């Protein structure tokens, strides 16, 4: 019996690109130019740790420079390799084009298990990696702007930005060289939650269109929908928390590295998060059924499945058994090309990764703009907004006194209306707007063309078309 050949992550991205490109009228040369990765840099460097020199291998791939700077995260993981980094860089190109952030696509990675090192050792390694990238202009506010990814966070971004600033002491925009920094190092409110918040906004927009909800065999709104989340890291945790606390969804399953939790009545996301922080996993968590085989819960009955960890978790071996009628890809590439085909034939609706997890790069864009403008959002206009609102409230209060019991303002109206938007509210507003408009651009292609059967193909068509227009504007 011949073993089933599963396409690699890189092959999956190329297959999905080719499927969309075959439905477009692009000159062959331009199609090839958009598809290929422009450059990948491999850096190997030594760091003296614990009395001896350790050599590390890192990558930074630049997929497309149709717009600059190029943008994309840096991940720390032992599985990092050139093919993975190039596939992720390609996804960044299409993602930025789809949500209309003015960046090309890039991605980076360092082959390292961060759990094996003390904090001061990680700082040495990160600063040396940043040095190797920055001296090749692979960290630069106008050319290449990294961000956090799997295995990295605010701390690593602060080290990288500081390393760039040390090397470029007269660059007034040095803070814009990296996004995803802590607030006190030039970061922006709402960046940590951004990708999870984007998942919430993407689902809200999907459920605003009854025709689309019906295609997934569902009805109604998010309230009461049963959700299984695979991976309770930064993205999965925030998505699950917001959906359960703000939209009334029920988190019935949580899958982690050491098994899964299931409770049809719902799981307290915050409680599970605290348990993981304290115990390192979900084993022995008291308020849900624990299964050592996480894959079983991936295949459980639910309304929405959110794969929020690694790529390729839904593949040819388990796609037939996935019962969720709606999948939203919070991770990059969690559904392989082969599994995608099986699920489409079953009628499963997939909200694709290049759209669904674009919250991170969207808010990174806002942070980059904030760093370049050297002023926080809301600082100029917030009090002016409050003063204008005060005029209206004063007039309403005058009417209130004049009309007496015949009319009165709703409780809390004054307090809510008078408060001008702060940076976090403006960031959330901008992210919500971005996710709505991007979904509508995909949806238009999905519904207007008989040859486009799914949202992923629609997303690729929108993104490729925008990249092609950028290249044409450059004279290519």
Image (cartoon, rainbow, N blue to C red):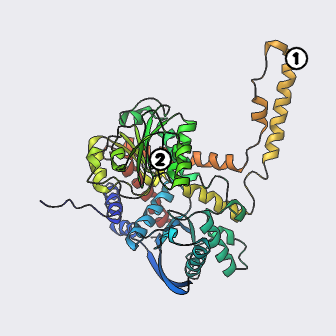
Instruction: Identify whether 400 is placed above or below 468.
Output: above
Residue 78 falls in which quadrant of the image? bottom left
Judged from the image, the secondary structure of the residue bearing numbered disc 1 is: helix
75, 392: nearer the viewer = 75
Label 1, label 2: how far apart the Cα atoms are:
49 Å
Instruction: Identify whether 151 is placed above or below 350.
Output: below
Instruction: Return the x and y of residue 43 as percentages of the image width and height.
Output: 48, 81
Q: Which residue is mark 1?
A: 402
Instruction: Identify whether 303 is placed above or below 56.
Output: above
Asked if the residue under mark 2 is in contact with the one under mark 1, i.e. CB atoms within 8 Å, the reply is no
Judged from the image, the secondary structure of the residue bearing numbered disc 2 is: helix
Instruction: Return the x and y of residue 39 as percentages of the image width and height.
Output: 44, 76
| Label 2: few (<14), some (14–19) or many (≥20) C-alpha neighbours in 10 Å | some
Instruction: Identify whether 406 is placed above or below 141.
Output: above
Numbered badge on residue 57: none
Q: Is residue 342 left or right of residue 364?
A: left
Q: Is residue 211 left or right of residue 126?
A: left
Q: Is residue 473 left or right of residue 376?
A: left
Q: Which residue is mark 2?
A: 441
183, 373: nearer the viewer = 183
Question: Mark 1 or mark 2, which has the lower sequence index?
Answer: 1
Q: Residue at x 40, y 54 (%)?
A: 461
In the displayed image of the protein, which residue is found farthest to the top?
A: 406
Instruction: Return the x and y of residue 383 as percentages of the image width and height.
Output: 82, 45
Asked whether the viewer can see residue 66, the reply is no
Question: Which quarter shows the C terminus?
Answer: bottom left
227, 278: nearer the viewer = 278
In the displayed image of the protein, which residue is found farthest to the bottom?
A: 52
| Label 1: few (<14), some (14–19) or many (≥20) C-alpha neighbours in 10 Å | few
Instruction: Return the x and y of residue 402 as percentages of the image width and height.
Output: 88, 17
Mark nearest the camera among 1 and 2 is 1
Q: Residue at x 42, y 55 (%)?
A: 257
């Amino acid at each position: 019996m011949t073993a089933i050949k599963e396409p690699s992550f890189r092959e999956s991205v190329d297959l999905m690109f080719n499927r969309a490109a075959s439905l477009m009228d692009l000159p062959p040369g331009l199609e090839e130019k958009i598809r290929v990765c422009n450059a990948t840099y491999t850096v190997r460097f030594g760091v003296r740790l614990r009395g001896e020199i350790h050599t590390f291998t890192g990558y930074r791939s630049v997929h497309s420079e149709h717009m600059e700077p190029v943008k994309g995260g840096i991940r720390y993981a032992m599985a990092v390799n050139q093919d993975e980094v190039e596939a992720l860089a390609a996804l960044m190109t299409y993602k930025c084009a789809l949500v209309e952030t003015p960046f090309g696509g890039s991605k980076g990675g360092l082959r390292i298990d961060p759990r094996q090192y003390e904090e001061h050792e990680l700082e040495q390694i990160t600063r040396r990696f940043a040095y190797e990238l920055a001296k090749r202009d692979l960290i630069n506010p106008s050319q290449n702007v990294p961000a956090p990814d799997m295995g990295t966070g605010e701390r690593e971004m602060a080290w990288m930005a500081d390393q760039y600033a040390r090397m470029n002491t007269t660059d007034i925009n040095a803070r814009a060289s990296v996004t995803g920094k802590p607030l006190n190092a030039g970061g922006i409110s709402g960046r940590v939650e951004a990708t999870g918040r984007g998942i919430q906004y993407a689902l809200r927009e999907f459920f605003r269109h009854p025709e689309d909800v019906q295609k997934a065999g569902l009805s109604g709104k998010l309230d009461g929908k049963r959700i299984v989340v695979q991976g309770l890291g930064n993205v999965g945790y925030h998505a699950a928390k917001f959906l359960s606390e703000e939209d009334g969804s029920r988190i019935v399953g949580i899958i982690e590295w050491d098994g899964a939790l299931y409770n049809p009545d719902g799981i307290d996301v915050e409680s599970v998060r605290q348990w993981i922080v304290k115990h390192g996993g979900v084993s022995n968590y008291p308020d849900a059924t624990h299964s050592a085989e996480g894959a079983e819960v991936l295949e459980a009955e639910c309304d929405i499945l959110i794969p929020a960890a690694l790529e390729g978790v839904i593949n040819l071996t388990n796609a037939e058994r996935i019962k969720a009628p709606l999948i939203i890809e919070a991770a990059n590439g969690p559904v392989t090309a082969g599994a995608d085909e099986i699920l489409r034939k079953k009628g499963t609706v997939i909200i694709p990764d290049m759209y669904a997890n674009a919250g991170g790069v969207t808010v990174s864009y806002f942070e980059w703009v904030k760093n370049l403008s050297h002023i926080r959002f809301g600082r100029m206009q917030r009090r002016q907004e409050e003063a204008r609102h005060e005029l209206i409230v004063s007039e309403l209060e005058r009417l209130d006194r004049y009309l007496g019991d015949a009319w009165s303002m709703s409780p809390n109206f004054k307090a809510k209306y008078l408060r001008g938007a702060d940076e976090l509210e403006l960031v959330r507003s901008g992210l919500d707007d971005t996710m709505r408009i991007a979904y509508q651009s995909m949806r238009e292609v999905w519904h207007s063309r008989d040859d486009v059967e799914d949202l992923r193909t629609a997303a690729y068509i929108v993104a490729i078309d925008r990249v092609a227009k950028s290249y044409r504007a450059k004279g290519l």
